[in-house]
Image (cartoon, helix red, strand yellow):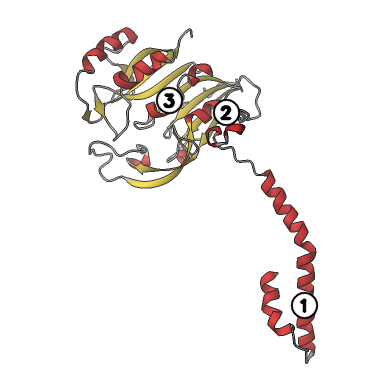
Amino acid sequence: AKIAFRSLLPKTIGMRPRSRKGWGLVLLSSLILFVYFHNFQKIRELNDANIVNVNIDHDSSVLPQSQQQNKKAALDIQRKDGTHVILNIGSNDDPIVPRVNDDDPCTISIAFEPIVAHTIPPHPGLHVVSAAVTAEPFGLTSMYIYNKRGVSSSLSRPTKKADWNRNGGALKVVPTVSFRSILESLQNFEIDLIMTDMQGHDFAAVSSVGSLIKEVGVKRLVTEVYKDNVVSYEGAKNDICRDWLPHMQFVGYVFEGLTRMKKNGKEALVEGFYNEEQAIESCQALLQKETTAGFAEYNAYWRLEGQ
C-alpha cells in the first residue's frame, strides 16, 4: 500500500485532474490511503501480539541473575511425570531407542545429532534434536565434517590423518545447546541412561555440570573415552585415566568396565579395565607416559552409587 500510494503522489498532489483518468487516479490513491490508515492500528496490534507470544527457551545461564532462579521450565511431551528417558548425545544415525515390542508408553529416547539427524529412522518413542551439545550456553558453532555422510564430524580437527578424515574437514554451522540445559529440562523425568559419542568432546560437556548428573538422578552413563594417552582430536580432554575416572568418582559414579568395538560389530571388555579396582591400578602406570596423537576410542560404563 505504501509503495502504490507513493508512486501516485507526484501525479495527484498539487495538480488539477484534466480528464476522467486523472480523477480515477485521485480516487484510487485516496482509497488506498484510507484503507491503509484504517487498518494500520489493527496491523500494529496484531504484530505486537505475535511478538509477545514468541517464547524462545534460552539457557538460564544467559538470563539476568534476577530471572535465573525462576527459569526451570520442564520439557512437556504430553506424558505424565516420571517418564523414563534415554539420552543419546551425538547419536550418529543409530541412537538407542525403546524396544520395538515395548508397549510401555513411559519410555522415550531423545537423540541430539547435528549433522546426520535426517538419516535417523523414525521410531514412535524417539525424539530427534538437530543440535550439538556443548558446555556452553545456547548459540551457534562450526563443526568439521568427516567420514561418509559426516558420521565422524567433530567440533575439533583430528590429531592424525587417516582414511576417514583425509578428504574431509568442510565446515558447517550448527546450533548448540548446553548439557546443563538438557538436564534441567528433564527435571520431571527419570533419566535411565545417557550415552555420549561426541568425537572427543564428551568429557567437556559432562564435566561442565559437575554433580548435577547425580542430583537429577542419572542412573547410568556410557561415554566415549580415550585410552593409553592417545588423543584423537585437537584440544579435547577425554582420557579415561586423566579426566574421566577421577571426575566420575568425585561426583558419585562407579566405573563398571571399558569396552572396544570389535570387527564383528560386538563390544569386548578391555583387559585391565574390567572394573574400577583394575582401572585404578592400570591408570597408575599409564599416567606416567606422555600423550600422543592417534585413535584409541573406547566406551566407558558408569553407574550411580547405590543403584
Task: Kindly state the secondary structure of the residue where label 3 is placed.
Answer: helix
In the image, taking residue 34 as reference, residue 304 lies left or right, namely left
CB atoms at circles 3 and 1 under 8 Å apart?
no
At label 3, which amino acid type do we have?
Answer: Val
Quarter of the figure that contains the N terminus: bottom right
Distance from label 3 to label 2 (Cα)?
A: 16 Å
As drawn, the label of residue 28 is 1
As drawn, the label of residue 206 is 3
Residue at horizontal 52 percent and vertical 35 percent from the top: 128
Regarding residue 217, the answer to whether it shows in the image is no
Residue bearing mark 2: 185
Farthest residue to the front: give it.
66
Regarding residue 70, the answer to whether it shows in the image is yes
At label 2, which amino acid type do we have?
Answer: Ser
Distance from label 1 to label 2 (Cα)?
A: 56 Å
Sequence-first tag of 1 and 2: 1
Asked where in the image residue 9 lies, by quadrant, the reply is bottom right
Q: Along the line of sight, which residue is nearer the eye, 261 or 176?
A: 176
Q: Is residue 252 above or below residue 40?
A: above
